[in-house]
Image (cartoon, helix red, strand yellow):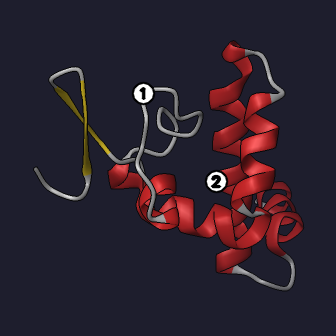
């Protein structure tokens, strides 16, 4: 079995981007796994750099199930804005949208 997979009751579960970053086993109950699968590693890195794993986990845990995806998408968008323009980040993106 590879280091990225976790065996649970005969089934394998690939580690999510958050667990890979933290170098820990990804369990079936991982709160970030549905929103940061392994192929979204770059997006997770950006979100982690801006907010931190602990804060992202707290944000997601404190939301209703139906609101979590939108919140994570917002965090990813804000983090990507920060990467593109570290000075203006989100406000620069909003202003460019309004000016267009």
**Percent from the top left, x then y, of residue 36?**
48, 45
- Mark 2, residues whose alpha carbon is within 10 Å: few (<14), some, or many (≥20)? many
Q: Quadrant of residue 69?
A: top right
Q: Quadrant of residue 88?
A: bottom right
Residue 77: assigned label: none
In-image side of 7 versus 20 (left or right): left
| Element on which disc 2 rests | helix
Extreme residue toward the front, this view? 9
- Mark 1, residues whose alpha carbon is within 10 Å: few (<14), some, or many (≥20)? some
| Element on which disc 1 rests | loop
**Percent from the top left, x then y, of residue 1?**
10, 50
Extreme residue toward the left, this view? 1
Q: Could one spot residue 8 in this view of the protein?
A: yes
Q: How many marks?
A: 2
Residue that appears at 48% across and 32% down: 34
Quadrant where the C terminus lies? Answer: bottom right
Label located before the other in sequence (1 or 2) = 1
**Percent from the top left, x then y, of residue 57?**
72, 44
| Tag 2 residue | 76
Q: Quadrant of residue 51?
A: bottom right
Q: Is residue 42 placed above or below 67 in the rendered structure?
A: below
Residue that appears at 26% across and 55% down: 4
| Tag 1 residue | 28
Q: Is residue 47 placed above or below 38 in the rendered structure?
A: below
């Amino acid at each position: 079995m590879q280091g990225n997979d976790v065996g649970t009751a005969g089934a394998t579960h690939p580690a999510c981007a958050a667990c890979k970053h933290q170098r820990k086993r990804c369990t079936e109950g991982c709160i970030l796994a549905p929103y940061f699968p392994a192929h979204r590693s770059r997006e997770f890195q950006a979100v982690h750099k801006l907010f931190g794993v602990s804060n992202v986990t707290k944000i997601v845990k404190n939301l209703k199930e139906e609101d979590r995806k939108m919140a994570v998408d917002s965090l990813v968008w804000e983090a990507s804005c920060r990467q593109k323009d570290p000075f203006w980040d989100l406000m620069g993106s909003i202003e460019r949208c309004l000016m267009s």
